[in-house]
Image (cartoon, rainbow, N blue to C red):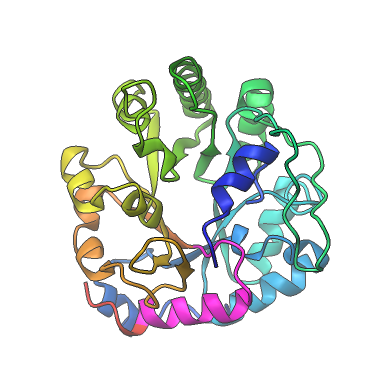
């Protein structure tokens, strides 16, 4: 699967994007202390979950996933539900809603851009999406109403220094609003944040010019590596700043996404440094896989049976 999520998020201006407890054996293999568990980012099921929300979540719970990070839904809201309804549904299935992704600000569609094809073979139809620049307080209030721990900016415009400055202002303002609401705010990266923009590295500006307490980082390990960064070195430079991770694998060329353990990333080394990072939760993710259920099953098995951090 080619790396097409970033382009999709930028150009559409949208965030499109099982049952048993995390076993003691798995906890030992990862050397986690409760309540750490294997989480899933629901963007992995974009184009699928909206057709059968409860049925899809039931299958996810059946694999063994215990924590959920939600993303964009074609139904609007939280997969067509209100925050408390979505939380209740997850609870009924033995899972916890930990985090939710939102867009930082609108993006402009490039001329001639064609929407990606969904699982049904038809171009995706994307309804209007709320964003932090225009709807910050509503999104913060909904996160608080749902009782989730984290609200995460999934993507924001950083194509120029002016856009970066605007994004940093949005992040700081949202971080302050989240603090007042009892929610922790964080920013999720792609690889674009590590490439120069007018002589500056956007991620460096974003991590140094935002409040370290109010704005944490959700480090997408694969995107950071694709951007030329070593996650472990990032943890050492900014200890405690990375409470959330996205976990997916890449091939040697960093072109194709694989289930965790199916590519070339040394997850053992990264997980061994989770305390330096300040990691609290991690979410498996696979951007638009051919078979989402098979992918998350493979990732879960690798994490719980093979990684021995």
Examine the residues drawn in magenta and state their main secondary structure.
helix
Assess whether residue 99 is covered by the magenta stretch.
no
Between 297 and 252, the one lying in front of the other is: 252
- Would residue 247 be seen by someone viewing this image from the given angle? yes
Between 88 and 193, the one lying in front of the other is: 193
- Would residue 213 be seen by someone viewing this image from the given angle? no
Taking the spot 64% from the left edge, 44% from the top edge, the residue there is 15
297 sits left or right of 260 in the view: right
Q: Quadrant of the C terminus?
A: bottom left
Q: Residue furthest front?
A: 112
Taking the spot 43% from the left edge, 17% from the top edge, the residue there is 161
Assess whether residue 300 is covered by the magenta stretch.
yes
Taking the spot 25% from the left edge, 68% from the top edge, the residue there is 266
Which quadrant would residue 91 be assigned to in this image?
A: bottom right
Give the vertical position of 288 relative to 239 (above or below): below
Q: Position of residue 20 (x, y in %)?
A: 52, 82
Between 227 and 144, the one lying in front of the other is: 227
Q: How many marks?
A: 0
Give the vertical position of 129 relative to 7 (above or below): above
Taking the spot 39% from the left edge, 28% from the top edge, the residue there is 214
88 sits left or right of 52 in the view: left
Q: Position of residue 98 (x, y in %)?
A: 52, 53
183 sits left or right of 30 in the view: right
Please give the range of residues in magenta: 285-304
Q: Position of residue 10 (x, y in %)?
A: 60, 38
Between 251 and 265, the one lying in front of the other is: 251
Give the vertical position of 280 relative to 13 (above or below): below
């Amino acid at each position: 699967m080619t790396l097409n999520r970033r382009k999709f998020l930028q150009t559409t201006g949208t965030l499109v994007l099982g049952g048993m407890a995390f076993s003691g054996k798995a906890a030992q293999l990862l050397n986690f202390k409760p309540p750490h568990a294997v989480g899933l980012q629901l963007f992995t099921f974009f184009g699928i979950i909206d057709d059968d929300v409860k049925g899809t979540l039931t299958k996810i719970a059946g694999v063994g996933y215990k924590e959920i990070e939600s993303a964009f839904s074609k139904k609007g809201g939280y997969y067509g539900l209100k925050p408390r309804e979505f939380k209740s549904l997850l609870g009924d299935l033995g899972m916890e809603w930990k985090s939710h992704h939102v867009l930082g600000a609108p993006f402009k569609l490039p001329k001639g851009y064609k929407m990606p094809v969904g699982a049904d073979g038809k171009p995706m139809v994307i309804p209007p999406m709320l964003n932090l620049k225009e709807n910050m307080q509503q999104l913060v209030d909904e996160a608080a109403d749902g009782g989730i721990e984290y609200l995460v900016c999934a993507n924001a415009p950083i194509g120029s220094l002016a856009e970066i400055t605007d994004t940093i202002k949005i992040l700081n303002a949202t971080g302050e609003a989240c603090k007042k609401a009892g929610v922790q705010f964080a920013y999720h990266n792609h690889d674009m944040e590590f490439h120069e923009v007018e002589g500056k590295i956007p991620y460096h500006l974003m991590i140094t010019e935002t409040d370290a307490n109010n704005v944490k980082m959700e480090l997408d390990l694969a995107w950071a590596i694709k951007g030329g960064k070593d996650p472990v070195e990032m943890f050492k430079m900014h200890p405690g700043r990375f409470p959330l991770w996205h976990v997916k694998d890449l091939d040697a060329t960093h072109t194709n996404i694989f289930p965790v353990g199916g590519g070339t990333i040394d997850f053992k080394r990264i997980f061994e440094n989770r305390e330096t990072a300040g990691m609290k939760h991690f979410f498996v993710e696979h951007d638009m896989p051919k078979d989402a259920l098979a992918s998350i099953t493979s990732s879960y098995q690798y994490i719980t049976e093979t990684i021995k951090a």
